Amino acid sequence: MTTPIIRRLDDLRANLREWKRNGDLVGVVPTMGALHDGHLSLVRAAKASCDRVIVTLFVNPRQFNSPEDFAKYPRTEIADAEILAPLDVDALFVPHVAEMYPLAHATTISISGVSEPLEGAHRPGHFDGVATVVALLFNMTQADRAFFGEKDWQQLLVVQRMVTDLRLPVEIVPCPSIRTESGLALSSRNQRLSDQARARAVALPEALFEAADAIAKGKTVDNAIASARARISIAGFDDIEYLELRDSATLGPAQADRPARLLVAAWLDGVRLIDNVAVPPSS
């Protein structure tokens, strides 16, 4: 069984007209490719609740802050199609840049609030690029449901805010982060880590989970974060861009009586890794 690859919007729309005519519920899993078990968990969730499933593969130039980072991002279309084949998705939509952004394209979507701290502060314009491409993909795929992983927590909140504010007719379905047995959150960027770096990268989730547990047991946030930073640094990370406790829903200052998240971004051997874990409210 092969995965049908569609590159032109007109061809995708031809399929969508038939599916919608039949009353099929359409799910979409937006990706930038380099698929792993985290992506596949989203596809399985979509298959379980939708009649038709579209996986999109588009390395979006507008969400990269560095041309070098964009150039280095893994591109594995053939392998991705093979990985998806057993899951029997209805289409792998792989548009060219010109299909997404024709020369006359002049619209950018910007979300304030949840986009501004953390990733927003360190990657100016990143979430404008994310919001714009996701809105385009929602429109192109006419999806009823869209599936996003919780590993990119801030991205999930940005997309949810956009859908609410623009009254878009799509349900956002959050799905749990998928981790290796050692606890490392699966990410396409992990493919760029050496075996030695991947072994050291485990310190990132370990430090987060330990800090979350310490905060839940009454340790001060400052002390828990300081301990986590020390552990990450000792493991050999080059730079910790942020490690902060934030309100889960707003990414504003954490409140003791509300669910919170510990979120981190750090560099290891030239690869930027992000992660987050939940911290329950104090009892």
Image (tube, helix red, strand yellow):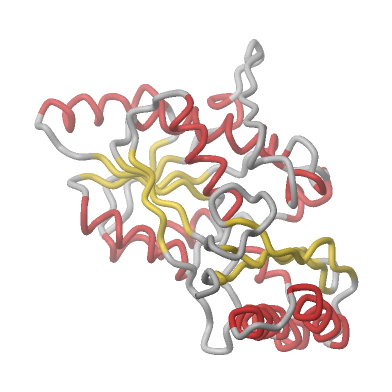
At x 61% / y 31%, what residue is drawn? Answer: 97
Query: Where is 91 relative to 75, above or below?
Result: above
Question: Residue 213 placed where, x, y %?
Answer: 60, 84
Q: Position of residue 178 (x, y in %)?
A: 48, 72
- The image quadrant of residue 222 is bottom right
Q: Residue at x 53, y 25 (%)?
A: 99
- Residue located farthest toward the right when viewing the structure as drawn: 238
Quarter of image, res 262: bottom right
Depth check, front residue: 184 or 247: 247
The residue positioned farthest toward the left in the image shown: 22
- What residue is rendered at 39% in x and 37% in y? 6
Q: How many marks?
A: 0
Pinpoint residue 40: horizontal percent, then vertical percent: 40, 64
| Residue at image coords 64%, 10% | 104
Q: Nearer the viewer, residue 214 or 90?
A: 214
Query: Compared to 167, does 90 lie above or below?
Result: below
Please tell me which residue lies in front, 15 or 267. 267
Instruction: Please give left or right for residue 205 compared with residue 69 in the image.
Output: left
In which image quadrant can residue 270 be found? Answer: bottom right
| Residue 59 pos. (x, y %) | 61, 44
The quadrant of the picture occupied by the N terminus is bottom left
> Is residue 99 placed above or below 81 in the rendered structure?
above
Is residue 239 toward the left or the right of residue 208 in the image? right
Nearer the observer, 123 or 224:
224
